[in-house]
Image (cartoon, rainbow, N blue to C red):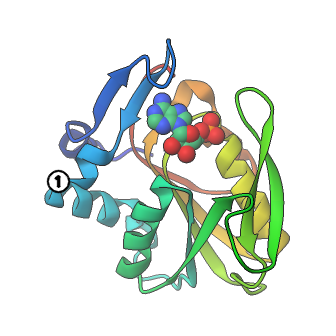
Amino acid sequence: MTPPVAELDLRSAIRSIPDYPKPGIMFRDITTLLGDARAFRRAVDELVQPWAGMKIDKVAGIEARGFILGGAVAHQVSAGFIPIRKKGKLPHQTVRMAYALEYGTDEMEMHVDAVKRGDRVILVDDLIATGGTAEGAVKLLRQVGAEVLAACFVIDLPELGGAAKLRAMDVPVRTLMSFDGH
Ligand code: AMP
């Protein structure tokens, strides 16, 4: 659930840009939050607050904004960091998963040895919309035997149903604020 106190403080740190990258999309820009030391720290603290004190082996971040938030979260909870990248970017042997985009599909990859069977992993990205990207990442982590403890996002676009999709996959979802529309 969205904690109202955190929402009050953090919402104003998000910049909204209409019609980017194309007409009809309201782009929720987190670079303004990242550039504000207080808001950045607050967001990182709040993202993993329900799992504070639990054993977390790894934090997986989705390219590219999930790397920034996920790296900070990993440091915060003393966990390792795993990059989940677009295909063709990782140098070692990978596992690959197709995921749904608005039009068509793409593939994401993770190093095959990034996670050990039974590792407790938290997934992090900046925003969840349709949930196609996060669903692919959860499947990829589960494919190599990870236990996905939770998926954490600064922003939820609930009308697009992504958080509900993840919860239906038995993944607890943490979001810090939500916006109407796309
Ligand atoms: P989805 O797979 O539909 O849940 O899309 C999530 C991914 O697309 C995340 O990595 C977001 O960074 C990006 N994204 C989707 N919609 C927006 C938006 N309105 N503003 C900013 N980023 C978005």
Residue depicted at 77% across the width and 44% down the height? 106
- In the displayed structure image, the side of residue 102 where residue 181 appears, left or right: left
> Mark 1: which secondary structure?
loop
Position of residue 132 relative to residue 141, above or below, is: above
Q: Is residue 162 visible?
A: no
Residue depicted at 53% across the width and 30% down the height? 158
- In the displayed structure image, the side of residue 9 where residue 54 appears, left or right: right
Residue 42 appears in which quarter of the rendering? bottom left
Q: Tell me the amino acid under the disc marked 1.
A: Asp
Q: Quadrant of ligand 1?
A: top right
Residue depicted at 20% across the width and 36% down the height? 12
Foreground: 109 or 81? 109
Q: Is residue 43 visible?
A: yes
Q: Position of residue 74 (x, y in %)?
A: 44, 77
Foreground: 112 or 156? 112
Residue at mark 1? 36
Position of residue 73 relative to residue 54, above or below, is: above
Residue depicted at 82% across the width and 57% down the height? 97
Q: Position of residue 166 (x, y in %)?
A: 68, 47
How many C-alpha atoms fall within 10 Å of the one at disc 1: few (<14), some, or many (≥20)?
few
| Figure disc tally | 1
Foreground: 79 or 50? 79
Q: Position of residue 162 (x, y in %)?
A: 63, 38
